[in-house]
Image (spheres, rainbow, N blue to C red):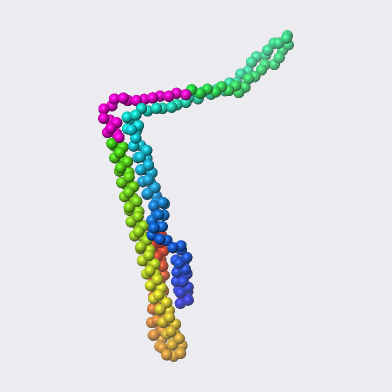
Amino acid sequence: MKKLIFSLGILCLFQASSQQPLSLSDAIQIGLQRNYGIRIESGNVEVATNNNTWGEAGRLPTVNLNVQSQNSVRNQQSDNLFFGGQLFPGFELNNQRTYGMTPGVTVTWNIFQGNRAIISKRRLDQLQAESEQNADVVISNTIQSIILGYYVAVLEQRRLGEFQKQLNLSSDKYDYIQTKYDLGGAVTSDMLLEENNYLTDSVLVLNQQLALNNAFRNL
């Protein structure tokens, strides 16, 4: 039982130590690049910026380009033909194709519309500013969450190290008291007490490893 718990603890520590070290700046950079909330808000800012033009507000003329395509396929079959006093079979004209294309341009410009264009442009400015502010809030909240998650993970990792030190101490004490018991220098109650302390510390290490894994996942 002792060897099994100790092996599990070493395995958990090995898995934790095998991870590549991650600095806080790297964690923030990864979060800013991959956070879906930031991506969505960045897209909203881009849309609001593209829409914030005088043309969208209605002050500039609107130009529409269009092209109409006209295509046709014709199949024709004739009656018998007489040529040189001889009878010839009829002829067929299949898959006669005709292609046509007609371009067009339409320009629409509302010259006088009062202050409607100015009001619309101000509204577009407000929408762009709101989108940028929302993006700033999402970025700030994301950075705050990353920093909090990072230091929680660091704290849990340090706690795991302290629990592991306590487990090593309990293991040494348990080995020592077991040796004394084998030589007749300790009673059964002393050995059971140290064994209980060792098992308790082993459980604490495993629970702390679970807490550390959860902190890593949250980060």
Visible residue check, residue 199 = no
**Compared to 171, does 206 lie above or below?**
above
Q: Residue at x 41, y 64 (%)?
A: 213
96 left or right of 103 in image: right
Q: Which stretch is magenta?
A: 103-121
91 left or right of 150 in image: right
Q: Residue at x 36, y 57 (%)?
A: 146
Q: Farthest residue toward the left?
A: 115
Q: Residue at x 45, y 86 (%)?
A: 179
Q: Residue at x 43, y 81 (%)?
A: 172
Q: In which quarter of the view is residue 219 placed? A: bottom left
Residue nearest the observer in this picture, 95 or 22: 22
**Residue 112 part of the magenta segment:** yes
Total tally of numbered discs in the picture: 0
Tell me where residue 133 appears, x and y as whole percent: 31, 46
Residue nearest the observer in this picture, 181 or 23: 23
